[in-house]
Image (cartoon, rainbow, N blue to C red):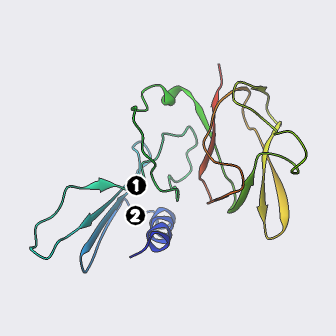
Amino acid sequence: MDLKEIQNLIKFVAKSGASEVKLETGDVKITIRTGSDEKETTVVQQVPMGGQVQPQMPVQPQAPAPAAAPQESAAPAKEEAKPAEDDSKYVTVKSPIIGTFYRKPSPDKPVFAEVGDAIKEGDVLCVIEAMKLFNEIESEVSGKIVKVLVDDSSPVEFDQPLFLVDPS
């Protein structure tokens, strides 16, 4: 089972409203849990030929979000050396569509928002290209950009975290 199939499965489970789904195919075991107050967790286990299960490896941790939308993310987990103890006070700006993320309106222009910039509600933070259309993504909160979570010119999925904003 490849990453795309796992991502599609996560989206399907989140939309279905199921709280937990377990799938076992051959040597891969997947458990997807969703919930309104808890983080979404996807666990993939490889079962070796001997039949013993290796330690569980989280594939897609989801940062807590203030929105009450279903929790889902298609970005593979990157190495996180520090725990997200202080990320809970930040607002996560997520992608409303699937497409290609751009920080600039065009290659010769400056970026919309840098880390440390003060933003207000309605400010354009980035554009996402979908089917040759460039969609401006506006901030829904006022505050300061703390972190840009996606590299420029990278593909993004629906509901993928893009920015962390400190609303204070």
Callout 2 secondary element: loop
Give the total of numbered labels: 2
Q: How far across and how far down the image is residue 63, in percent?
A: 48, 41
Name the residue rendered at 39%, 32% in the picture.
83
Q: Nearer the viewer, mark 2 or mark 1?
A: 1
> Quick check: marks 2 and 1 in contact, CB under 8 Å?
yes
Quadrant location of residue 55?
A: bottom left
Instruction: Indicate which disc, 2 or 1, sits on the residue closer to the N terminus.
Output: 2
Query: Mark 2 is on which residue type?
Result: Ala
Name the residue rendered at 62%, 59% in the picture.
158
- Extreme-bottom residue of the structure: 26
- Would residue 42 appear left or right of 144 to someone viewing this image? left
- Would residue 46 appear left or right of 114 to someone viewing this image? left
Identify the residue position indicated by label 2 in the image. 18
Q: How far across and how far down the image is residue 93, in percent?
A: 65, 41
Identify the residue position indicated by label 1 in the image. 34
Q: Relative to residue 139, is residue 115 depicted above or below?
A: above
Name the residue rendered at 67%, 63% in the picture.
98
Name the residue rendered at 60%, 54% in the picture.
159
Quadrant location of residue 85?
A: top left
Look at the image and tell me in which quarter the N terminus lies.
Answer: bottom left
Question: 80 or 12, which lies in front?
Answer: 80
- Extreme-top residue of the structure: 168
Q: How far across and how far down the image is residue 19, in percent?
A: 37, 59
Q: How far across and how far down the image is residue 132, in percent?
A: 84, 68
Query: Mark 1 is on which residue type?
Result: Thr
Q: Relative to residue 130, is residue 126 depicted above or below?
A: above
Quadrant location of residue 32?
A: bottom left
